[in-house]
């Protein structure tokens, strides 16, 4: 099937961006296959109304990206059926590395992936998304907020977008694989209540700067009141004196490290003198001390399912279950 192009005058993209996107799209959906020839510059200019200069620039850009190639006698053709994916994560951490490694290893070799980070900065997030439009066949994006989807994501074709980890998009058109920070979190706390009851006080370490959903604080308070546990909310663990008989639920890994160091300094044993639960599992937490008890989803499974969406183009609407993994720290 010969490639054709129709300009969309209502699009926010330039003519050049539209043409590049259309060719990439034709390759990703199978309209153009490896070895297929594109129309000549003159022919496409006549059929589409685009200038020869615009078409030549588009073809040159795609050649630089190794999407197409050319021969002096036959013209431009698809050099390989590669699929380019943007993965936009919030930040880099041990469990994000696990997720990304699982995602990348589950994709075929002809998929190339650009990994970017927004660090919860709305301006950076918006600019990265806007700059990506028309450059990728699929988009996997970690949202900034748990409460709702960032408006700029609506500029991405919903058939190509997967929202990951935080916040259901609120649209039946957009795929998602997310966590449940409410009922699933409460169920995990209830499962561990018999261990938590061994301590005099249960504290949630929740820094003001953390992007972790604030509903966590409400669920924690609800649980402790139901169980009649003495409890507290700690915003800065470095100002808290770690004492025997305390248990801690920790969101950030650097706060976890601080508690373990303080225990070691004071001769307190995690799991006996002090209880520790950490959010989000990683391989290191399996082996630190006698192991760190965690509340976590399976990030390898999240990566595998995200890869399946990218490869199959079949939409997924999944809330992964959180698990309480009991180890020696509680």
Image (cartoon, grey):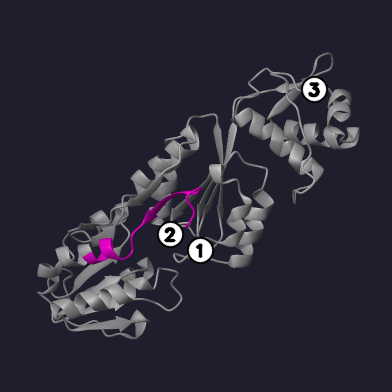
Residue 64, above or below 34: below
Span shown in magenta: 170-186
Which type of secondary structure does the marked residue at label 2 adopt?
loop
Residue 160, above or below 82: below
Quadrant including the C terminus: bottom left
Q: Position of residue 18 (x, y in %)?
A: 75, 41
Q: Are marks 1 and 2 in contact (CB under 8 Å)?
A: yes
State the mark number for residue 294. Answer: none
Which residue: 51% across, 47% down?
173
Few, some or many residues within 10 Å of mark 3 (<14, 14–19, 20+): some
Few, some or many residues within 10 Å of mark 2 (<14, 14–19, 20+): many
User: In terms of sequence position, does the residue under pointer 2 or pointer 3 come before the other?
Assistant: 3
Which residue: 49% across, 54% down?
171
Residue 157 covered by magenta stretch? no
User: In terms of sequence position, does the residue under pointer 1 or pointer 2 come before the other?
Assistant: 1
Q: Nearer the viewer, residue 59 or 39?
A: 39
Q: Position of residue 59 (x, y in %)?
A: 79, 31
Q: Alpha carbon of mark 1 to alpha carbon of mark 2: how far? A: 8 Å
Quarter assignment of residue 117: bottom right
For disc 1, the marked residue is: 144
Quarter assignment of residue 199: bottom left
Q: Is residue 187 left or right of residue 296?
A: left
Q: Position of residue 307 (x, y in %)?
A: 44, 39
For disc 2, the marked residue is: 166
Which residue: 84% across, 13% down?
73
User: In terms of sequence position, does the residue under pointer 1 or pointer 3 come before the other?
Assistant: 3
State the mark number for residue 39. Answer: 3
Q: Nearer the viewer, residue 235 or 287?
A: 235
Q: Position of residue 191 (x, y in %)?
A: 15, 63
Residue 172 covered by magenta stretch? yes
Residue farthest toward the top in the current orientation of the protein:
73
Q: Are marks 2 and 3 in contact (CB under 8 Å)?
A: no
């Amino acid at each position: 099937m010969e490639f054709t192009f129709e300009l969309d005058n209502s699009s926010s993209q330039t003519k050049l961006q539209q043409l590049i996107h259309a060719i990439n799209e034709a390759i990703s959906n199978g309209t153009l296959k490896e070895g297929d020839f594109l129309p000549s510059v003159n022919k496409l200019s006549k059929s589409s109304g685009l200038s020869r200069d615009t078409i030549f620039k588009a073809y040159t850009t795609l050649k630089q990206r190794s999407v197409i190639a050319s021969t002096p006698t036959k013209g431009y053709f698809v050099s390989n059926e590669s699929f380019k994916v943007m993965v936009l994560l919030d930040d880099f951490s041990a469990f994000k590395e696990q997720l990304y490694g699982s995602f990348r290893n589950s994709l075929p070799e002809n998929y190339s992936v650009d990994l970017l980070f927004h660090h919860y900065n709305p301006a950076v997030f918006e600019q990265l998304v806007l700059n990506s439009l028309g450059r990728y066949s699929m988009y996997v994006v970690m949202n900034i907020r748990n409460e709702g989807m960032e408006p700029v994501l609506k500029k991405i074709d919903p058939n190509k977008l997967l929202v990951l980890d935080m916040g259901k998009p609120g649209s039946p058109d957009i795929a998602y694989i997310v966590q449940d920070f409410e009922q699933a979190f409460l169920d995990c706390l209830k499962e561990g209540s018999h261990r938590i009851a061994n301590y005099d006080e249960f504290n949630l370490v929740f820094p003001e700067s953390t992007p972790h959903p604030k509903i966590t604080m409400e669920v924690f308070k609800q649980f402790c009141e139901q169980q009649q546990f003495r409890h507290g909310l700690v915003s800065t663990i470095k100002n808290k004196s770690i004492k025997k008989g305390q248990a801690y639920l920790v969101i950030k890994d650097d706060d976890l490290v601080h508690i373990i160091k303080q225990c070691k300094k004071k001769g307190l044993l995690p799991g006996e003198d002090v209880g520790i639960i950490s959010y989000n599992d990683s391989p290191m937490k399996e082996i630190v001390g006698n192991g760190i008890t965690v509340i976590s989803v399976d990030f390898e499974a999240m990566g595998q399912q995200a890869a399946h969406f990218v490869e199959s183009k079949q939409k997924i609407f999944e809330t992964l279950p959180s698990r309480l993994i009991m180890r020696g720290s509680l």
